[in-house]
Image (tube, grey):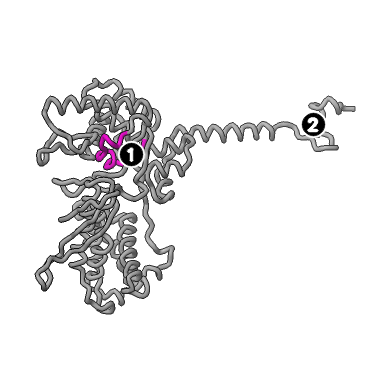
């Protein structure tokens, strides 16, 4: 392993791939930009993964003899391995389940639109869980189709396939996702919860959880982004939070700090005096705790877990806040929400109270504004306000319609109500 600082924010990455016939080590190199050695190490991990899978990918198979399984291996090495770890695993889970069961041995040149339609029909007849007996949702069918379409599109891009058979499926027959909205609180429930946590004792644990809650609610930051925050990401003077990394789940025993979900996810988020006050309280509590225990926080994580890994404290897991929320919701008979619900609430309340959709898109770190629109939930208070606006408008129209109408130059039929035209 080799990561060399070349100065001016440039780093050289070297991955050794074996020994040549002359006995010398062979390597692949890559030059990247990174603001720190830790960031450069993250780039190195991605580069090493790419090199490893490129070595394993079949390179000598003619396109007309390429099976879907072999294409999937190439796709995983060339494309999927560059994604965030959680994205990689999600894609592999979808691929290696139903898609591979159906297409693995097929030559990609012979896959037709009828084959794809047959696959979709088979999905709609499958059980999602043998224990519950529930069928696959249309959203899950869409995810399988979307990944299959993507892999075949890459084969076209890489000149392995002349035409993507998914393009031959009529648009009205292509699966569509049925997105479900995360549960969110109405204003009355949110206000009740604020009162509940406002009355909690000011223990170090409560301050930490309140800080995470209000930070998520005000900024709409993803739970993995909040978990990965370090103190140098907090600008107390400008009241700004810099997001440039996220905690990723690898497996039950491991998490990693990596780049955020998309390039658009690198952003600055602004907070108010109240959240800054909570952050200052939490920082003081954390410093006192570390001093008393004799622990180190070399990476400067804002939210720490009370457990050691390799003699270092680890950042709090993304589920920590959820367990706190769940406990309080049940205790006080509030509708249960998730941590991701806070992200939806940040977007919903901002949009319902006049924020521009493009501003909320930037706040959430979305690449596509259509994704941001999914986060807009109708609130009952807004529904009532809209109904009142329409009610007042229609009420005025009814009153005007009920008044006697006099056409210009003509006599009103009800002359008793018009003193200018008495009966004779």
Residue on which disc 1 sits: 242
Q: Is residue 97 visible?
A: no
Label 2: how many residues lie within 10 Å, few (<14), some (14-19) or many (20+)?
Answer: few
| Residue shown at 24% from the left, 67% from the top | 74
Side of 292 where 126 appears, left or right:
right
| Residue shown at 46% from the left, 44% from the top | 358
Residue 308 falls inside the magenta stretch: no
Side of 191 where 322 appears, left or right:
left
Query: Closest to the observer: 49 or 5?
Result: 5
Q: Position of residue 169 (x, y in %)?
A: 40, 68
Instruction: Work out whether 50 lies above or below 7.
Output: below
Q: Secondary structure at mark 1?
A: strand
| Residue shown at 13% from the left, 46% from the top | 253
In contact (CB < 8 Å): disc 2 and disc 1: no
Instruction: Work out whether 57 lies above or below 214.
Output: below
Magenta span of residues: 219-234
């Amino acid at each position: 392993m080799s990561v060399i600082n070349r100065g001016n924010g440039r780093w050289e990455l070297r991955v050794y791939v074996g020994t040549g016939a002359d006995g010398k080590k062979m390597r692949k190199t890559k030059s990247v930009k990174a603001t720190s050695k830790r960031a450069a190490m993250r780039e190195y991990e991605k580069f090493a993964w790419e090199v490893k899978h490129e070595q394993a990918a079949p390179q000598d198979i003619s396109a007309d003899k390429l099976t879907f399984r072999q294409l999937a291996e190439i796709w995983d090495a060339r494309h999927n391995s560059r994604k965030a770890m959680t994205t990689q695993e999600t894609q592999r889970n979808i691929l290696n389940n139903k898609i591979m069961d159906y297409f693995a041995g097929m030559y990609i040149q012979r896959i037709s639109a009828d084959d794809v339609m047959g696959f979709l029909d088979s999905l709609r007849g499958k059980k999602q869980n043998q224990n519950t007996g529930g069928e696959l949702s249309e959203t899950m069918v869409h995810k399988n189709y979307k990944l299959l379409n993507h892999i075949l599109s890459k084969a076209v891009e890489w000149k392995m396939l002349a035409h993507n058979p998914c393009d031959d499926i009529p648009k009205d027959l292509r699966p569509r996702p049925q997105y479900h909205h995360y549960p969110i609180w109405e204003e009355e429930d949110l206000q009740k919860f604020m009162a509940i946590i406002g009355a909690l004792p000011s223990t170090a644990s409560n301050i930490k959880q309140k800080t995470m809650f209000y930070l998520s609610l005000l900024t709409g930051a993803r739970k993995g982004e909040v978990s990965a925050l370090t103190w140098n990401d907090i600008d107390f003077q400008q009241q700004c939070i810099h997001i440039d990394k996220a905690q990723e789940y690898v497996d039950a025993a491991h998490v990693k700090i990596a780049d955020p979900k998309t390039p658009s996810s690198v952003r600055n988020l602004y907070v108010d005096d109240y959240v800054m006050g909570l952050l200052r309280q939490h920082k003081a509590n954390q410093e006192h705790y570390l001093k008393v225990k004799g622990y180190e926080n070399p990476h400067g994580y804002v939210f720490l877990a009370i457990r050691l890994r390799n003699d270092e404290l680890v950042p709090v897991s993304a589920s920590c806040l959820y367990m706190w929320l769940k406990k309080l919701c049940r205790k006080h008979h509030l509708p249960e929400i998730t941590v991701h619900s806070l992200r939806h609430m940040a977007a919903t309340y901002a949009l319902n109270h006049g924020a521009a959709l493009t501003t909320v898109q930037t706040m959430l770190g979305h690449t596509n504004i259509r994704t941001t629109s999914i986060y807009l939930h109708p609130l009952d208070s807004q529904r009532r306000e809209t109904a009142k606006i329409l009610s007042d408008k229609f009420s005025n129209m009814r009153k005007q319609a009920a008044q006697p109408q006099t056409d210009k130059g003509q006599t009103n039929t009800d002359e008793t109500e018009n003193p200018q035209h008495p009966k004779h």
